[in-house]
Image (cartoon, rainbow, N blue to C red):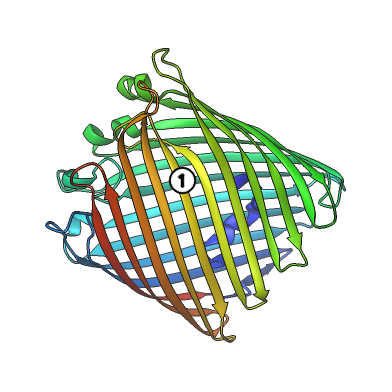
Amino acid sequence: MKAWQLPLFAMASVSTAAYAVQPDGIMLGSGVTLLPSIKAEVENNSNIYLQDSNSEVSSVITRLAPSIALEVDLGATLLGFAADFENGTYDHDSNDNYLDQTYSASGEFELGAKNSASLDASLNKGHDDRGTGALEGPQATSIADPSEYDETTFGGSYTYGADSSMLQLTGFGTVYDKSYTNNKSSTADLEHDKTTLGARLSYKISGMTRAEIEVSQAETSFVTDTAALERDGSETRLMAGVSWDITGKTTGSLLVGNSARSFDQSDLDTQTKFAWEIGASWSPREYSTLNFSSNQSAEETTGSGNFIDRVVTTLSWDHEFSSYWSADASFSRTSDTYVNAGVSAFSDRKDTLNDMSVGAVYSPNKMVDIEAGLTKSARTSNVDGLDYSQTIMVASVLVAF
């Protein structure tokens, strides 16, 4: 599901939405609610630099993640503001320590019975762990520090038509920019901006299903001349399908269509791909839910090729055993093809990443979550030095007020 399709004011409470906690927040009056939280986590990571079996390095990572959100309910207008922080400390090498920060603001506006709009903005001051991004495989420790970046995103949407209307039309747009603040020798070619515009038309077939058509155009521009020659261009997506909500037990959407990635350089061929976006949930009981998703997308490459043709498929299960205990399990497969647009249908690199995870949450009350989880990951690649396996064990405590 795209960010513009989400209820954007929920960004302000995203730090708690993924957990069982249901805090009341601190009511400040006049529809204003303050939602502070803090999470402490200890992780045992068997392969922090994502190396092959001969070069694995393990570490215990301690994280502290405070967050504060402000929600303002003005009736027809909902506003959200949030600041999230995460400090990570490695016992293997302090050079890998980091402090990530995310600031966001969003709003939802009811402009009448059939008109609504939303706006959002965020600044993410994050990092690429060594072993990811531009520092994969044998290059992981060639630079002493993780690569730090700033991401800024501005987005908005306008919808004509109520949820119950026969026709509903939504226009949306996003402006995205990513720039690195260190390790410029390896990260300069990753800096880029992307502008996306699109529209979706939804037609009510019945009380439970809607037919949908979506078209979008994304323009990508890289900062350095080298990257611009290889990657500058656009992607056009045309999708059609249906969405459904059958008595609350099963909900989802299925969109299929065409994705065309073209380039500003005339000697680079347009790459046309079959595209799809599938998401479905089934709840045989209100306390147990199966989720399935699969999608194809074009992502920016961190190295070889002109772009990445990515396919992600995920199956997950969430179950509440009682008001105190819940568990989840998931499996996902990501297939990345690094497309060389200079030679049609030719790719230098293909990766397959499999992730399996299980977790359990104990919630003694609506303000506290105690969580434990295990994740096993493995990547296979046709490029030497990029295969790896990794085991992560995590224990955490979340307190939300």
Residue 220 vs 43, above or below: the answer is above
**Residue at the spot 69% in from the left edge and 64% down from the top edge:** 250
Residue 253 vs 322, above or below: the answer is above
What is the residue that sits farthest to the top in this orientation? 266
Q: Tell me which corner region of the image, top left, top right, bottom left or bottom right, holds residue 249.
A: bottom right
Left or right: 347 in relation to 220: left
- x and y, in percent, of residue 318 in the image: 54, 73
- x and y, in percent, of residue 327 in the image: 49, 78
Left or right: 48 in relation to 282: left
Going by the numbered disc 1, the residue's amino acid type is Val
Residue 205 vs 44, above or below: the answer is above
Give the residue number, with chain letter if any, for mark 1: 311
**Residue at the spot 22% in from the left edge and 66% down from the top edge:** 46
Residue 1 visible to the viewer: no
Q: In which quarter of the image is the C terminus?
A: bottom right
Looking at this view, is 141 or 349 the one in front?
A: 349
Residue 156 vs 340, above or below: the answer is below
Looking at this view, is 27 or 113 the one in front?
A: 113
What is the residue that sits farthest to the left in this orientation? 54
- x and y, in percent, of residue 342 in the image: 36, 20
Left or right: 399 in relation to 351: right
- x and y, in percent, of residue 246 in the image: 76, 63
Say few, some or many: other residues with alpha carbon within 10 Å of mark 1 (under 14 / 14 to 19 / 20 or more): some
What is the residue that sits farthest to the front in this orientation? 345
Q: Is mark 1 on a helix, strand or loop?
A: strand
Looking at this view, is 234 or 4 the one in front?
A: 234
Residue 97 visible to the viewer: yes
**Residue at the spot 33% in from the left edge and 25% down from the top edge:** 227
